[in-house]
Amino acid sequence: MQAPPPTPSSEEEGALDLPLLFRGGGWGVVEHVRRGKLTPNAPLAPLVWFKSGGTAEWLFEPKDAADLQDFLAGLAPDVPVMALGLGSNLIVRDGGVPGVVVRLGKAFAKVERVDEITLNCGGGASGILVSSTARDHGIAGLEFLRSIPGTVGGFVRMNGGAYGREVKDILIDCDAVMRSGEIVTLSLADLGYTYRHSELTDGSIVVAARFRGHPGEPAAIQAEMDRISAAREASQPLRSKTGGSTFKNPDGHKAWELVDKAGCRGLTLGGAQVSEKHTNFLINTGEATSTEIEALGEEVRRRVKEQSEIELQWEIQRVGKA
């Protein structure tokens, strides 16, 4: 009988045993996983903008979409799965993230022109890469992606947007690997977009998307990207450890104005602070814990509710165990 392949030691590390991670022991899947990289108890703080938080029980970095499909298909159905992009717009709680965190690498960061006004973008491609590629091909209408600090997979999932545009305005369809391992193509209608929300199921991972713009002059496109970049630089704490926009804008209101009216500009809790520059941003001033950052956000929500009778909703995702 062939012995099972060597696996990362999880007993002393405290991570879920590999045989328990996969259906029926899943040694064949473990062999296949070697195409990608599977790491137990992987620190997530270096991978997120806040630079805080615990570890992933397992971090999987697939080699390609087929590798991801096989991995998820072999994974025990009760193991939770979460995708991680650039780690903006995310609080990883200090107790870490159970199950598997999937991080898409360079193989998923390609952007290619399909036709005169359409791009095919990998789920790991950044907004900057997508907008720059669009500019190089004379495709206008995607400039706003320059201001979204994330990857295609993330902003397709949450209908990311800025400066009057949202992903729903440019998306044709996307490819997603479902929690079962099946890969499906979802249309704009399938995603059921609302403000900063889609109907994508938990555990599904966007691996590619098609965006459509309209013909434009590269110089004019670059000028618009420069305008957006300058506006962000002037109004947002881009040089700080932050998570981007913290709260969704309530109907008829701007979150930052509500936070400001509640007297929260510069409010601190431990090492966490409400930005003086833009009050809808929380920042890690040094060694803040995720617990402090989240607690500060909840205190801001409490004060806004007390002052304006409006309940702010988190835009930043909060994941893991406290």
Image: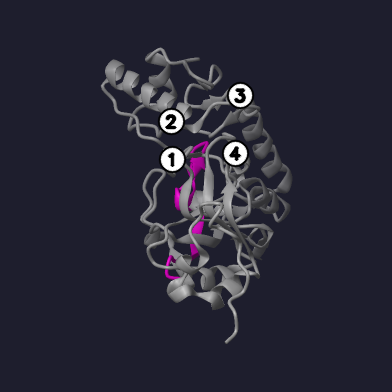
Indicate the amino acid at tag 1.
Answer: Arg
Discs 2, 4 touching: Cβ within 8 Å:
no
Question: Is 169 part of what is drawn in magenta?
Answer: yes
Give the secondary structure at mark 1. strand
* Separation (CA) of disc 1 from disc 4: 22 Å
Disc 3 marks which residue? 286
Disc 4 marks which residue? 147
Counting from the top left corner in percent of width and height, residue 160 is at 49, 45
| Residue visible at 47% across and 15% down in the picture | 267
Magenta-highlighted residues: 157-182
Mark 4 or mark 1, which is nearer the start of the sequence? 4
Mark 1 or mark 3, which is nearer the start of the sequence? 3
Of residues 69 and 76, the one drawn nearer to the viewer in this rendering: 76
Any part of residue 141 in sight: no
| Residue visible at 66% across and 50% down in the picture | 216
Discs 2, 3 touching: Cβ within 8 Å:
no
Counting from the top left corner in percent of width and height, residue 293 is at 47, 28
Q: Residue 252 falls in which quadrant of the image?
A: top left
Discs 1, 2 touching: Cβ within 8 Å:
yes
* Separation (CA) of disc 3 from disc 1: 20 Å
Disc 1 marks which residue? 318
Q: Is residue 99 above or below residue 96?
A: below
Query: In the displayed image of the protein, which residue is found farthest to the top?
Result: 263
Counting from the top left corner in percent of width and height, residue 304 is at 33, 20
| Residue visible at 42% across and 57% down in the picture | 80
Indicate the amino acid at tag 3.
Answer: Gly
Q: Is residue 11 above or below residue 158?
A: below
Disc 2 marks which residue? 294
Indicate the amino acid at tag 2.
Answer: Glu
Task: Nearest to the eye among marks 3 and 1: give it.
Answer: 3
Counting from the top left corner in percent of width and height, residue 111 is at 66, 59
